[in-house]
Image (cartoon, rainbow, N blue to C red):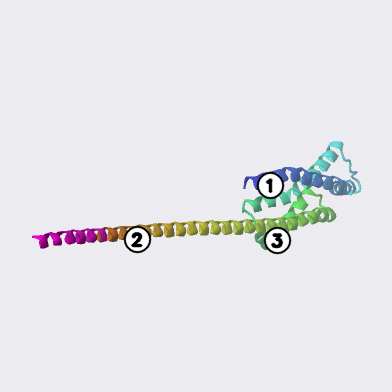
Amino acid sequence: NPVKNLFFAFTGIILSPIWFIMGLLFGYYIIAPLAINFLGNYEVSSQINNIIEVSSFMSTVMSVSFAAAIAFQLPLLIRLLATIGLMTSEGMRQYRKIAVVVLLVFAAIITPPDIVSQVLIFIPCYALYEYGIRIAAKIEAQKAKEEAEYQARMQQEQAAIEEATSEAAEEKATEEATGEAAEEKATEEATEKATTEEATEGATEEPSDDEQ
């Protein structure tokens, strides 16, 4: 359906930057401060002072915020894959444990080696995964509804075609029967006419014989 495809593309264009900005803000205001705090308080030795450069600070904030923004695109990715049939809600439920491990590894990569930061990024990512399952299930239900409507429409069209064919066959049979009846009637009339003419000729010829 072109209208539905257009609507899907339009909503994707609208939702993608919204989710990206939400992830960016989450990373900037939640994860980045925790990462900077961890790096600032981390000490290899009491004799070594931590000196954070501005470039390092900006790089950490930008990388963490951008990674969170990318993570928040997960629902849209699931929606796309579910729409084209590459991902199902049942499959996502089946591989939920594997998804948890992948999300934990992802959280460990984009956050400093701090369990609190990792948990803070893992929780929303897992929530987005569960939300993606609901999105996939909704898309599957919509597809099933459209398929049922399509099958019902096809059955109605097939029934209409069969009914039209049956009516045409009945009309043809009626016309043939009417034609045959007309031919039989015409034949009977012709026969009766011929018989009447013969009888008339016979009656005309008899008085002539008597007169002779």
Residue 56, label in figure:
none
Q: Position of residue 195 (x, y in %)?
A: 22, 61
Residue 96, label in figure:
3
Q: At x 14% / y 62%, what residue is drawn?
A: 206
Which mark lies nearer to you, 1 or 2?
Answer: 2
Density class for disc 1 (Cα within 10 Å; few <14, some 14-19, many ≥20) is some
Which mark lies nearer to you, 3 or 1?
Answer: 1
- The region drawn magenta spans 192-212
Label 3 sits on what residue type? Arg
Q: Residue 101: in sight, yes or no?
A: no
Q: Is residue 45 left or right of residue 139?
A: right
Q: Main secondary structure of the magenta part?
A: helix
Density class for disc 3 (Cα within 10 Å; few <14, some 14-19, many ≥20) is some
Q: Position of residue 187 (x, y in %)?
A: 28, 59
Nearest to the observer: residue 83 or residue 100: 83
Nearest to the observer: residue 203 or residue 190: 203
